[in-house]
Every structure is written in C-alpha cells, then in structure tokens.
Amino acid sequence: MKGTTMQRTTKFWRIAIGALATASMLGCGAASESRLEAEGEARTSVDLSWAAPNPDAPGPGDLAPALAIEETLNGPPDADADWAALKGKATVLEFWATWCAPCVQVIPHLNELADDLPTDDIRFVSLTDEAEEVVAPFLESTPISGLVGLDLDRSVFRDYGVLAIPTTFLVDREGVIQAVTRAHDVAKEDLLDLIAGRRPDVPEIEDIDGMLELKALDELAARADSDHLVVKGSRGERMLFAPTEKAEYAMSRSPDEVRMVAADPALILRVAYGVRPGRFVMETELPDQKYDVAVMTGGRPELVEPMFRQIVSAGLGIEAVWEERVVDAYVVVQKGEPKLKPLPDSARYGYSVSSDSLGATDLDGLADQVARLLERPTLNETGITGRYEILLKFDAPEPEAIFQAMEDVLGLTVVEEKRPIKMLVVEERAAAESG
C-alpha cells in the first residue's frame, strides 16, 4: 500500500438503499472474538451488545460512578478501589487491556507519573476486563505502578461509557471527574493541578457520537455539490462518507451500526471487507486522505455489511472483489521442537505490532502480524493451535530480522513459496464498469 499518494475528489453519488434488499440475504455465522474468517471471507458477527453507547456516560463536572470491581491486583492485601477507600485522594483511572498496543505503550509514562507523585495525594487505578490468569503473568514482565482492577463483567466500562481504550479519567479529591483524556497527554503538572483542585488543561477525548451525529448528516445531505457522500433511507438508514481533517482515529461498532473517524482508505477497506493483512491487490491508487464513515441501519443488523461495502465503494470510487491469485507468500512451519509458553484457555486474543516488535496470543495471529509488517500473505502451517505468550523484538521491520527472531524465540521457521490465495482486488470503479 506504500506510495499511494494520488488525490481523488469524491463527488456526491446517489444510491438507492432499496437496492440492498437482495444484499441483505447475506448470512453471518458466529466467530471467535477479534478474529477474521480464514482466506478472505468477511468478518462475521459477534455479540457486541455491550458496545452500545451509554447515554448517561459521565463527563467533566460529573460525579464519578461507583467502582464495582470484582478483584484487585498489584496492591497491598487490604487494597480497595471503591470511592470510599479513595476519598480524599485524586485518582487517575485508566481503562486498558494487555492486548491493546497503545495501552501497553503508555504504561511506562503512567508508572513515571505514579512514582513521581505522593501516594497520600493521588492514587493510580488501572482497569481491565481480563481475567487474573491473563493479567498476572503480564504484570510479571510489564509492571504497573498503582492498583490494577479486574472489571470482569464490564460493569465499570459500561457505567463510564468506555467503548475504546486506552481512556483516562482524572478524578479530583471530591470524586468529581475533571477530565476524560488519553494518558500520553497527561503531564505531572496536570496532576498537581488535579490534586490542588484545579481542572487540568488536557485535551478531551471527543465523543464519537458527537463526531458523527445525525444532525451533521442532515446538513451534509443538502450539499450535493460537495465532496461529502450522504445517503438517507425511509426506514432510518443513514450512510456517510466524508473527507475529514480530524487527527485522532476512533471507531465504534454495535450490531446495527459502524462509525469510523479519521480513518485512512486502506483501514476502511480492511474493516468493510474483513481483509486479512497482506491480502490486497491494488490495481488503482487510493486517495491520500482520511475519512469519516458512518453506517446506521435503522435497527437491522443484516444490512450492516452490504451498506458498509456499498458506501465505501461509492465513496472511494472503487470496485473490490475477491479473486484467487497465485502470489508470493511466507509460510510459517516447524522443523524442530517449538519453544512456546502456553496461556490459559480463558486468555483473550490480543495482538500488537510496531517497527521493532510484534505480539500475539496464537500462531494465526502471529502470521497476520508478520503479514501486516511485510505486506505479504503469511500462512501458519505449523499445525499448532492454542494460545501462547508471543513477543518478538527485532532491529528493523525486515524479513531477515523478523524471521530470525521467530526462530530464536519460538523455534519456528519461515519459508517463501508461491501459493494460490484469495485476495481482495481493488480497482477503479470506472475501469471495472467499462471492462
């Protein structure tokens, strides 16, 4: 996907939502959390009822909701994370998870803040919905200063309206929320203000509902000569595809809606079509532009997938079809005894990738992260199932360095072969229609 810098103007397309009637017959089966079906099939449905926005979610100036936490770790035996125990102290309340790369990346910064401020004045509480058998081993290799709370039923996530992580709540000594922000934007001076009863001057996390509200759709619908694509149906359906200058990416997903803010075209295509990493064939250049995308089906989950793909195709001016192509691929195999550290069956799937490391909890996920870094299909043919603690570090995101780390740390080998693989072929809409 590198080198795609062509600017394309997206004009207003008129789409008949009634035409989605036949597309709505597409079925969806059950899927394990955070995984895509193999070999180019679309993302299947999962239970996302917990992800419905909380209309009563608190914000700055509101009293912090109760902390109904099932279990706490990483503190003294009598430690507690309810507001009665925290009364009189300012609190940094961090929502996170072990599988969330941005969450893990900000831990050293939070630790530095916690270690540099008096515990009599401020408490750090990190909340995850993961089980102890997942979190405890993680803390052995990545310590967290402060209290770690396990919100196993996600009740605190719901009460605080947290749909995306990491999210940080700054709560003053009186239990009043003074800011909802990202931890990387919080400095020591901000927390000193919080302790002193002053509102910290930190950037607020913008509510994704406010970013893509229906009023904005109604206003944009009248701009037929703009670059904004807006479609409204008679049964409450709404679709939006619009260029944006927003800087921070966000995504919200529920059974009958998808909303993306400040997403680049490649990411939008991956979400819309469930594309596994490295499985694009780009026969046109994508715009060098970020977009806001919204698909609201009016309460009909079966329409999410066809509507999403339709608005993306029209908005980007492309056609995307699955085709089997013989392509160069990397294949992960075992040629000796693998060196894998098992995780408990209750461990959640989690993945991270950067220019000098990648992490995964299963070998299919490892293959996907390699494909993401190297932009080439990568297959797991080890025959090994289950969940494992996988963390690789390397000097550069180059095949030799990554494959050497896989051999040294995991005892796995990677070979290069040509394979027939289902690829998402993306071409310009005009060329596709004329051909």
Image: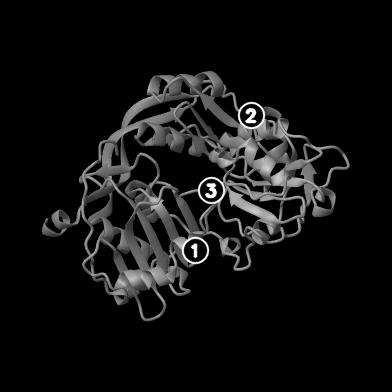
Q: Which quadrant: the C terminus? A: bottom left
Q: Which residue is mark 1?
A: 209
Secondary structure beneath label 1: helix
Earlier in the chain: of badge 3 and badge 2, it is 3
At which x and y percent is residue 257?
Answer: 46, 65
Q: Nearer the viewer, residue 169 or 39?
A: 169
Q: Which residue is mark 2?
A: 341
At which x and y percent is residue 73?
Answer: 78, 40
Categorize mark 1 by other alpha carbons within 10 Å: few (<14), some (14-19), many (20+). few
Q: At 56% across and 29% down in the image, what residue appears? A: 391
Earlier in the chain: of badge 1 and badge 3, it is 3
Q: At 79% across and 37% down in the image, what residue appears? A: 119
Q: At 14% across and 54% down in the image, what residue appears? A: 431
Q: Which residue is mark 3?
A: 203
Q: Which quadrant: the N terminus? A: top left
Name the residue furthest right. Answer: 78
In contact (CB < 8 Å): disc 2 and disc 1: no
From mark 1 to mark 3, how far is it between C-alphas?
17 Å
Earlier in the chain: of badge 2 and badge 1, it is 1
Categorize mark 2 by other alpha carbons within 10 Å: few (<14), some (14-19), many (20+). few
Which-is-in-front pick, marks 3 and 2?
Answer: 3
Q: Is residue 405 above or below residue 96?
A: above
